[in-house]
Amino acid sequence: MKKIITQGLRISVIKNKNEEYISLTDMAKFKDREATSIMIANWLSTKYTIQFMGAWEQVHNQDFNVMEFNKVDSKN
């Protein structure tokens, strides 16, 4: 696992096949080291994040149920 350092914060980068993923938990530490789970929960509940996740699933998940997702998306 490699790490990048930005603004004095180490962020883990995990490689899976040809894809690289950065640690959201490490990034949340920049805002509040003691409450990373709250930061992530807040980020995951935004309208834009939910829309992004729906678009991501449509592209990468052939079994994605768009009709069920629309029920979740319409609640935001």
Image (cartoon, rainbow, N blue to C red):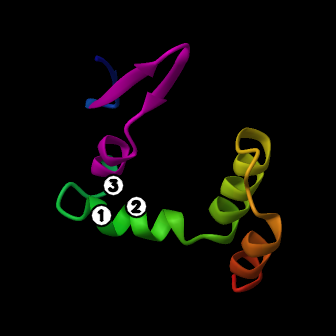
Neighbours of disc 1 within 10 Å: few (<14), some (14-19), many (20+):
some
**SS state under label 3:** helix
Relative placement, left or right, of 43 versus 14 is right
Picture layout, residue 12 above or below residue 61: above
Q: Are marks 3 and 2 in contact (CB under 8 Å)?
A: no
The C terminus appears in which quarter of the rendering?
A: bottom right
Which residue carries the number 2 mark? 40
Q: How far apart are labels 3 and 1 at the CA level?
A: 11 Å
Disc 1 element: helix
Q: Distance of mark 3 from mark 2, alpha carbons?
A: 11 Å
* Residue depicted at 27% across the width and 49% down the height: 29
Q: Is residue 39 left or right of residue 36?
A: right
Which badge, 3 or 2, comes first in the chain's sequence? 3
Of the two numbered discs 3 and 1 on the same chain, state the one appearing first in sequence.
3
Q: Which residue is more in the foreground, 70 or 62?
A: 62
Q: Label 1 amino acid?
A: Ser
Q: Are marks 3 and 1 in contact (CB under 8 Å)?
A: no
Q: Position of residue 58 (x, y in %)?
A: 78, 49
The residues colored magenta run: 10-29
Type of amino acid at the residue the image marks with label 3 = Lys
Q: Which residue is mark 3?
A: 31
Are the residues tagged 2 and 1 within 8 Å (C-beta)? Answer: yes
- Judge left or right: residue 35 versus residue 17: left
Mark 1 sits on what residue? 37
Dot 2: element: helix
Q: Residue at x 17, y 61 (%)?
A: 34
Residue 3, position as x, y percentages in the image: 30, 20
- Residue 40 is situated, as x and y percent measured from the top left of the image, at 40, 61
Q: Nearer the viewer, mark 3 or mark 1?
A: 1
Tag 2: amino acid = Ile
Distance from the alpha carbon under mark 2 to that under mark 1? 5 Å
Question: From what the image shows, is residue 2 above or below residue 33?
Answer: above
